[in-house]
Amino acid sequence: MTEQTSRRDLPACPVETTLMLIGDKWKVLILRDLLPGTKRFGELKRSLGSVSQKVLTAQLRDMEEKGLLQRKVYAEVPPRVEYTLTALGQSLRPILDAMAGWGEEYKASLGA
């Protein structure tokens, strides 16, 4: 998290705190796509499908500000920008794994 965010700015409930960080559909999918490793903006946009460039940019900036990912800009023409999860972002892996497991179980229960 940035210096501007302090403990007293966060909700008292830890679940609410987690949802504040990743409670958006696109943020969870961005995390999913970055868990295996670094990706460029265009790769993320293609992987996410229907997200607009404006929304994706806003979500990436917010996640960077909150310390979940880092952005690296290369001084090239055209500019190349890469996104990588920070250690804090990687620490969300068990949450996403649990969500994936639950989703699989739910889908299987519908087929039974």
Image (cartoon, grey):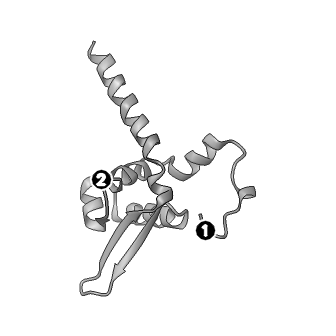
**Left or right of 4, for residue 84:** left
Residue type at mark 1 is Thr
Residue lying farthest to the right in this orientation? 8
Observer-nearest of 56 and 7: 7
Instruction: Look at the numbered disc 1 and give the secondary structure of its residue.
Output: loop
Say which residue appears at 43% left-offset and 35% top-offset.
98
The image's mark for residue 99 is none
Q: Which residue is mark 1?
A: 2
Q: Which residue is mark 2?
A: 48
Q: CA distance from mark 2 to mark 1?
A: 26 Å
| Residue in the image at 24% along x and 87% along y | 77
Q: Residue at x 44, y 54 (%)?
A: 90
Against 31, residue 103 (above or below) is above
Disc 2 vs disc 1: Cβ atoms closer than 8 Å? no
Q: Name the spot of residue 19 as percent of width and height, x first.
A: 56, 45
The answer to which image quadrant residue 5 occupies is bottom right
Q: How many marks?
A: 2
Mark 2: which amino acid?
Answer: Leu
Residue 92 appears in the rendering: yes
Q: Is residue 97 left or right of residue 91?
A: left
Residue at 31 percent of width and 67 percent of height = 41
Q: Against 7, is 96 above or below? A: above
